[in-house]
Image: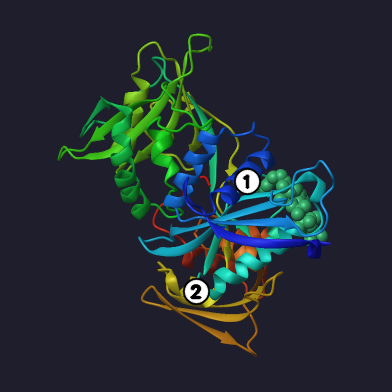
Amino acid sequence: MSGNYEIRRFDAVSKDEHGYAEAEKWVRAVAFGFHESTRSPEHVAKSLATYQADRRVLTGAYQTGEVAPGSLPADVPVATFGTLRKTLNIGFGRMLETQMVTAVTVRTSHRRRGLLRRMMSEDLDLARRDGIAMAALTASEGSIYGRFGYGVASFERTVKVDTTVRFQLNHQAVGTVEVAEPTVLLDVAPQIFDRVHRVTPGSIGRQEWYRQLASGSLGRDGKEDPAVKVALHYGPDSTVDGYVSYKFLGWDTTPYTVEVVDLVAATNEAYLELWQFLGAIDLVERVTWAEAPMDDPLAWALADPRCIESSDGRDMLWLRILDVPAALEARHYPVDGRLVLDVLDPLGLTAGTYALEVTGGEAAVVRLEEEEADLTLDVSALSSIYLGGVCPVTLAAAGRIREHKQGAALQARGMFAVERSTHCLTHF
Ligand SMILES: CC(C)(COP(=O)(O)OP(=O)(O)OC[C@H]1O[C@@H](n2cnc3c(N)ncnc32)[C@H](O)[C@@H]1OP(=O)(O)O)[C@@H](O)C(=O)NCCC(=O)NCCS
């Protein structure tokens, strides 16, 4: 069935540039796929300007046969798929160039004909040929991407924090927090994020839109958001090392609530002191944040950790290793050792038996023909444990990893550990 379609790839371009009409139709198709209202021409132009800054590649599937009379014309894609490349922090400050997959939609009337499978398989293959060892995405549903070799590698949760008198942090401030004009974040946000990115395993580079969102310049509805307010954290040396962007949700909310739009702190102190600031906003009784870490220092710094009401954890970053030796050799390992991994791959990109030999924290990976494996696992499970955010022992208990040598899953847990909890602050 997917033979009745042509797949086309093109770059995001700005208004007045060649190819804008095609890019515009692609953006509208994505908005349709995610059930948004039809985007205004201005909103589309702003979106495409940010996509161009990110050097996004836009992929569309187009009908090649006759189009039903009166239906959307053939130049409107029936399926969309977007990619951009940024670095992923893979622990201990190391970075790995990663293919970020986004904007995956298939028009209802063309679904379940293999279009997603075709676009995904082709794109992963192209990325791998281009020397990219990792792909990543965030998923709307949990059951779609495992079949393509993706595994959950990080989690997040929503917190509602009671900021009435109960809110007391056991922390002596070393810096200060000051309110700023939101637009300062157009410059400052990428700089601070870059610092956070370098010290946070699981962090993936942010797209251009984030600084616009944090500064209130471009909200999700394509307009400026005048409700956004911003505070900056200054470290002991008076340089800015963190910020919070937030909104008051209005006098109709009970309790009176502030919602965090973005909270990015490059030091432990900046994180706690931005929370001290949020907890001190007068007339406000609750602060919510939808992208909070699972393993949150805030809970341990609060005199009463029950000030935090949290949702269950949600999967956040999904990873897909495209090249096992390249991905494994890119990492630093806190524990030396040797593990033989038998990797299964539903798309056939990485299947094989590999010996991972770590000496002095550095890995050498060789492909083996004969040797018996210590662990057998699907590439999705290997991708899950790669960032140290998912425990191999748990995956063994779930039957996702088969242990042939006793203790091998525990050994993998030690080897794949990272220096602090995995957390990804970038949705895409
Ligand atoms: C999810 C979506 C992109 C799937 O596209 P599609 O072209 O119908 O998928 P395909 O026909 O290529 O199916 C590929 C495989 O995935 C499975 N699959 C597709 N969507 C699925 C879903 N929502 N849940 C479970 N399995 C799904 C298919 O059954 C098929 O399995 P198989 O190849 O093992 O038999 C499409 O339904 C969609 O646009 N949904 C709304 C937007 C969305 O959720 N996008 C994802 C953003 S992260």
Q: Secondary structure at mark 2?
A: loop
- Image quadrant holding the N terminus, namely bottom right
Q: Residue furthest left?
A: 237
Residue that numbered label 1 is attached to: 25
Q: Is residue 286 above or below residue 97?
A: above
Residue at the image point whose x is 50% and y is 69% from the top: 132
Residue 401: give x, y in percent of width and height: 66, 66
Assign a secondary structure to mark 1: helix
Q: Which mark is drawn over residue 131?
A: 2
How many marks do you count on the picture?
Answer: 2
Distance, label 2 to label 1, CA atoms, is 30 Å
Where residue 112 appears, as percent x and y from the top left, is 81, 54
Which of the two labelled residues, at mark 2 and mark 1, occupies the earlier sequence position? 1
Q: Which mark is residue 126?
A: none
- Disc 1 residue type? Lys
Q: Which residue does the image show at 64% across and 59% down from the upper left?
A: 395
Instruction: Name the residue nearer the viewer: 392 or 104.
Output: 104
Residue 398 seen in render: no
Q: Is residue 270 left or right of residue 87?
A: left
Number of residues whose C-alpha sits closer than 10 Å to that of mark 2, classed few (under 14), some (14–19) or many (20 or more):
few
Q: Tell me if I can see residue 110 in this picture.
A: yes
Task: Kindly check if marks 2 and 1 are in contact, taking CB atoms under 8 A apart as contact.
Answer: no
Residue 31 placement (x, y as % from top left): 63, 39
Q: Residue at x 47, y 39 (%)?
A: 46
Dot 2 amino acid type:
Gly
